[in-house]
Image (cartoon, rainbow, N blue to C red):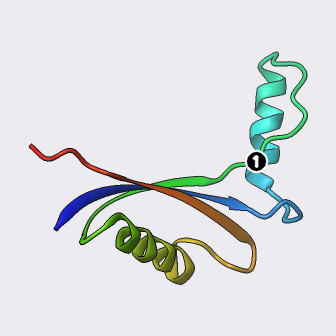
Amino acid sequence: MARYIAHVNVMLRPLVNDPQGLAVAGGLQSLGFSGIQAVRVGKRIDITLEAASEVEASTAVREMCQKLLANAVIEDFEFEVAALATA
């Protein structure tokens, strides 16, 4: 089996309030950073996994996102899967 790395990004949906993003925006402004229009805060999850193919790895990662990593009601996710070089 080959090894793959998946980079998963999970973000709140655009219409969901983001209190953490508001706090970061306020902090940036109070530090003198001007021109801040909006800040959204999300999470990145890196997963190393073994699979028979990149398609199988992608299918597994999508299922992980749907079942655990993202809340389908308020979050969207996207991911990339790439083969890891063998030593």
Q: Indicate the quadrant containing the N terminus: top left, top right, bottom left or bottom right.
A: bottom left
Q: Is residue 61 left or right of residue 2?
A: right
- Few, some or many C-alpha atoms within 10 Å of disc 1 (few <14, some 14-19, many ≥20)? some
- The amino acid marked with disc number 1 is Arg
Give x and y (percent) for residue 57: 36, 69
Q: Quadrant of residue 71?
A: bottom right
Residue at x 76% of width, y 48% of height: 40
Residue projecting furthest to the left? 87
Give x and y (percent) for residue 64: 46, 76
Foreground residue among 28 and 73: 73
Residue at x 36% of width, y 74% of height: 56
The secondary structure type at the circle numbered 1 is loop
Q: Is residue 54 left or right of residue 70?
A: left
Image height of 68 relative to 53, above or below: below
Q: Is residue 17 left or right of residue 24?
A: right
Q: Is residue 71 left or right of residue 8?
A: right
Residue at x 77% of width, y 27% of height: 28
The residue to which callout 1 is attached is 40
Give x and y (percent) for residue 38: 86, 40
Give x and y (percent) for residue 75: 70, 69
Q: Indicate the quadrant containing the C terminus: top left, top right, bottom left or bottom right.
A: top left
